[in-house]
Amino acid sequence: MSEMTMNEVEIETNQLSSKDRAELEKAQPMWKMVLTQFMDHKLAVAGAVIITLFMLVAIFAGTIQSITDIDPDAQNVGNRYLPPLTTAQVGQDVRETDIERYITENPEAADAVQKALVEKEIVAVAEADAIYELGAKETKEAISALQSLSLKEAAGFISLFKSFETFHLFGTDELGRDVFIRLVYGTRVSMGVGVLVAIASALIGLLIGSIAGFYGGLVDTLLMRVTDALLSLPHIPVLIVIAAIDMSKIPWLKAIISTSNESVFKMIIILCLFSWMSVARLVRGSILSIREREFVLAARTLGAKDSTIIVRHMFPNVIAPMLVAITLGVGESILFEAALSFLGLGIMPPTPSWGNMLNNAQELIYQAPFLAILPGLLIFLTTVSFNYLGDGLQDAIDPKAIRR
Amino acid sequence: MTTFITRRILQTLAVIVILSYVCFYLMSLMPGDPVDMMVASNPKITAEDVARLKSLYGLDQPVYKRYASWMGSIVQGDLGYSRTYRVPVQELMGPRLWNTFLLSAISLILSIAIAVPLGVLSALKPGSKTDYVVNLFSFGGISIPSFWLAIVLIILFAVKFPLLPAGGTQTIGAENMGFWADIKDRSIYLILPVLSLSIQQIGRFSRFTRSTMLEAMRNDFIRTARAKGLSRSTVIWQHGFRNALIPLITILALSFSGLFSGAILTETVFAYQGVGKLVYDSIIGNDYNVAMISFVISVSMVLLMNLVADILYGFADPRISYQ
Amino acid sequence: MLKKFAKGLCLVAGLGLSTQAVAAPTNAELKIGISQEFETMNPLIMSMSASAYMYRMVGRSLVVLTPDGKWVTQLAKEIPSLEKGTAKIIEEGGKKKIVANWEIIESAKWGDGKPVICQDFITSHTIATSPTVSVGEKEQWTQVEKIDIDPKNPKKCTFKYEKAKWDFFTLAQFFPVPTHLEKPVFDKYSKQKEGYEKNSNYVRNPTNPGLYNGPYVISDVKLGSHVAFAPNPNFYGKQPNIKKVIVKLIPNTGTMEANLRSGTIDMISTLGLDLDQALAFDKKAKAEKLAFDTHFVPSVTYEHIDLRLDNPILKDVNVRKALLYSINRDDLVKALFENKQQVALHNVSPKDPWFTADPKIITVYRYSKREAGKLLDAAGWAMGKDGYRYKDGKKLSIVFQTTAGNKTRELVQVYLQNQWKQAGIEVLIKNEPARVFFGDTMSKRKFEGMALFAWVSSPENSPRSTVYSKAIPNNSNGWSGQNYHGWTNATVDKDLEALDLEFSAKKRADLVHEILKLYTAEVPVLPLYYRSDISVTPKNLKNYKMAGHQFYETNNIEDWNLN
């Protein structure tokens, strides 16, 4: 008998093609399957790459600043609204301050250079003012003058003067600040707000949705009515009210909020208040359907606690749709932040965010269209990427998904 | 069915009252009332002026009393007086509501007319070139900041190629040109706002249609229907689409909640004479009566649409019945 | 498919390119763009600038201030004065009062042909002082105690003023309303709260020509959209040249230029563009040779920073002076405004007869980082290693607030923040929407350190409400007054009280100079700059002269000419 069975099995396995066999052999863990599935969705992968890139930019904004040596707050009001790819020199007051500092640090070199400058009649002022006089000139001219001295002490000054020249990849804004580095920092703020809001609101939604779905009855009715009410409330008035609250007056918030980042926190809280509802509904829906499933009944019969059932048995089943919801939520939050900034309720300057940069620029779109187009494009690109990423994840995680 | 509807209407009314109180309370929480604003803009106003105006406006009363008196006059059909524009609220809001309705309804209908077929089309051939293009378009639509799009549209079609007006509602004096000329004039002004409002909606709706349709087409009864040898179109529309309809109705009904807030941005950029802009201004300027009426209308619209959606479910899905 | 699309695009583009350049406007019609909202134009109740701008086209007052800063007559035959004996000081119940004779010019008529009579002033006085009508600033009405009509001539009357103030004749906002139209409404509804406001002809029937006595009457009005004006055949002066004027509301200043270029509007009013936009437009208009002129006219709008004087850091006058020394206002005006706006020395504008720049009278603060450093060192704020100053371990850090969404202010704010940083002063920006900023933070004196905003005034306007010690808002005075900084100075108080009652122009100037001396010495406020009024007009518009104060240039609209 047993041999017989063995044979049958043998026969059955024999019926498999070699290809099937190979596939069986490399039976994959879940995450690998998801990954393979995900990699098939080309645009989702592209989205993931773009997002990773922006994330890196956001995280390493400080490093980018030190590499490029451009301060996002450094103003240069003599060079406002410069077009992209232009070189400018920093304002004269900044130059004077820097020269003064350098001279006090290197008095001997300064002496030698000053003397040489006057001797060679490059400048026609007293020795003490010679270098400042040079500083008032065009930087290029000043550098060639210094080079013509062929003094070894001048080397330090040449590099100092060279640092007065700034290159603006994306031009400058209304205060002559570098748009590129502000966009870099804006990435940090906008992405940060987007990601934080999406995660926080997903957690709130998870909590409320699971409580409502699991307990049902009165609790469910109550929570869902609140959700519905919030969904039907017009958002703008409530947002304005919140914008008027001085959050630093709330004691436990005071520790993390300082005046300079208050608007960012306010933004996050405002957006959270209005974005958890869809997740709550989603979670409640899945929990409702899971609640009656056999494995939950089994767990309950075995005497598992409510919290155990929710956390151990139900959460894993809602994680996938949640992940998708978070991803899609980031894009939405970024858009929402931009819209609020458009109404003047967003993140306060001088902290740059894509939203408020766009807002600042929109009135001058005819004069400096680049200022408005760039942040708009970045918002667009990020949101599209997050949406594609969410789509890809959905397809990859959902076992019933249509294969591409 | 009738009892269900009556019950729901009563519930809705109760919710409207509660929410309107919440709104009223929220507005009272905001610092600064119309009199404070007046003082700030005019150094000559005296303390007596302030006290006099506050009692005239009833601002010295507690919130619940103010709410009660406001509610009382609403029930009597008096919607109050706009302190910003110095006209009765009815006169102010009537034409603007109509304008916003026109803008929203046209873009909603346009969006549905474009998005639903697109969504179904891409759901039928998932992974195909069509699907790919539709997806690209809808994701693009969802992700584009609408006011940015509006500004770009103005630059393109009003500045670079001056084909369309940069903003406004209609040509001044065009009201008397006759019916058709009037309609033509209004539509010229509507093209850009409708376009900028629709693109996002099209994206959202077509994504949604696609996913619900995909879901529906996966059902066993579709396979059965196919196996029975029913024609392709019957399978798609009678069996597939009908099942996709329910979630679609929900999302459409819910999209009405964004009607006012969504239109605010568009209306501001295009200087369109709608209610969205008015709502924003009335809140900023603490024009209580206007803001409250707008809240109530907006909340009622959403609740009403939810009710309509619930009723429509019954037609879309015979399994749902109301007792 | 693609080809078709491309063809379509080409067609569209071709159409666009073939459209003609916008023709210059003629006297047949002038369309003015405005970016601020307007309200119903009842002269007694309206409070918005845009309404005041338009009302000057349809309504006239007894006297008005010209763009050159002179008081001239409009509806009145002459300005009463003590010297001529047309006004005299009387004593009544121990109080000094003024009685002045006013006579309305013979030809002054309402749009329906009825004459403008003294009774019309009595009507508006009655309505405006009624407790059921929400008039904002009542003092300009209550300053006139009583109006008596000459029984022989309905156009002649005497005004009795509550106080003997030198500026009793400056009744530029004391507008009449037509008794024959408005009195019945008021009588019928005056018992009801806001009953008159809801039922006034200005609301119910705004195109009734009888409501207006200016060069134009309103022919069409749509709130939030536009107002159209047609010439008033019964106007007392010369008939206007322009046959139709439309004021169109374009709330988004960003699209204002597009509207101008596409011919939707012909000119942009004073209440239109931001300075930055105007500067950019001006350059482009010149480069592209567009047929527009951009006007920049210094106004009396005073942008300044109020310092909270009870703030522990700002209590010290040295710190306040250092704040002023460490900002380069000349550079600010040059770099950000291209010298189209003027640096402010104090709260009296250069347009004002009371103005002085005499260094013997006022303290002038020239930008000097060194001076600022010395003052801060003297005040005990020593420079720390991080580039900020410290005293007793506390950082020199001040909160700086302004109205969120006001582009120019936010720009200036960030610019100043950067300059103070170089002087070792940390400035934290905390902006709020205008309604919160003015409605609560300022009016309830909740601002912490510095607040940037503007005062709009007119020449020879007493600064009483902003520097008088009793004008410090607090709970006991019902939060009224605008002395937000909280400056108290006995001499200033005394001078302010004397100023109102001083009939000699020379002595008035001396009093103001004494106030300015103290104002600039004690620095309760950092003066920044005077705003400029900006407008864009077609090149062929003649006789257009901007006012630069609250009595707008539309007052001369009958002279405007587009030929």
Image: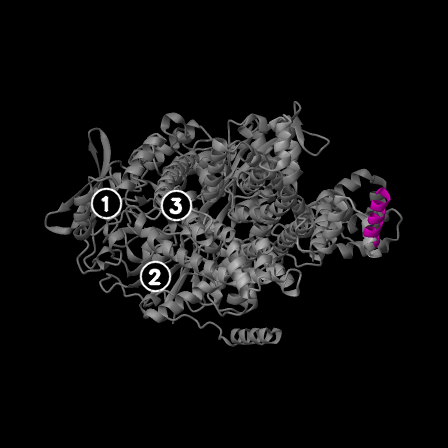
Tell me, yes or no, if residue B3 can be seen here: yes
Give the labeled residue for mark 3.
B300
- Quadrant of the image for the N terminus of chain C? bottom right
Give the labeled residue for mark 2.
C557
Quadrant in which residue A262 is drawn: top right
Question: Looking at the picture, how far across and down is residue A393, in whole percent?
Answer: 68, 49
Label 1 crowd (10 A; few <14 / some 14-19 / many >=20): many
Question: Looking at the picture, how far across and down is residue C408, in whole percent?
Answer: 53, 48
Circles 2 and 1: CB atoms closer than 8 Å: no
Between the residue at mark 3 and the residue at mark 1, the CA separation in whole angstroms equals 32 Å
Q: Are marks 3 and 2 on the same chain?
A: no
Chain letter of disc 1 in the image: C
**In the image, which is nearer the foreground, mark 3 or mark 2?**
3
Task: Tell me which amino acid carries mark 3.
Answer: Ser
Q: Which mark is residue B61?
A: none
Question: Looking at the picture, how far across and down is residue C546, in whole percent?
Answer: 41, 57
Which stretch is magenta?
A: A1-14
Between the residue at mark 2 and the residue at mark 1, the CA separation in whole angstroms equals 30 Å
Q: From what the image shows, is residue C434 above or below residue B204?
A: above
Magenta segment, prevailing SS (helix, strand or loop): helix
**In the image, which is nearer the foreground, mark 3 or mark 1?**
3
Q: Are marks 2 and 1 on the same chain?
A: yes
Tell me, yes or no, if residue A364 can be seen here: no
Quadrant in which residue C396 is drawn: top right
- Nearest the viewer among A372 and C32 is A372
Label 3 crowd (10 A; few <14 / some 14-19 / many >=20): many
Give the labeled residue for mark 1.
C196
- Residue displayed at 49% across by 75% down: C19
Q: Circle 3 — which element? A: helix
Between the residue at mark 3 and the residue at mark 2, the CA separation in whole angstroms equals 47 Å
Question: Looking at the picture, how far across and down is residue A89, in whole percent?
Answer: 71, 53
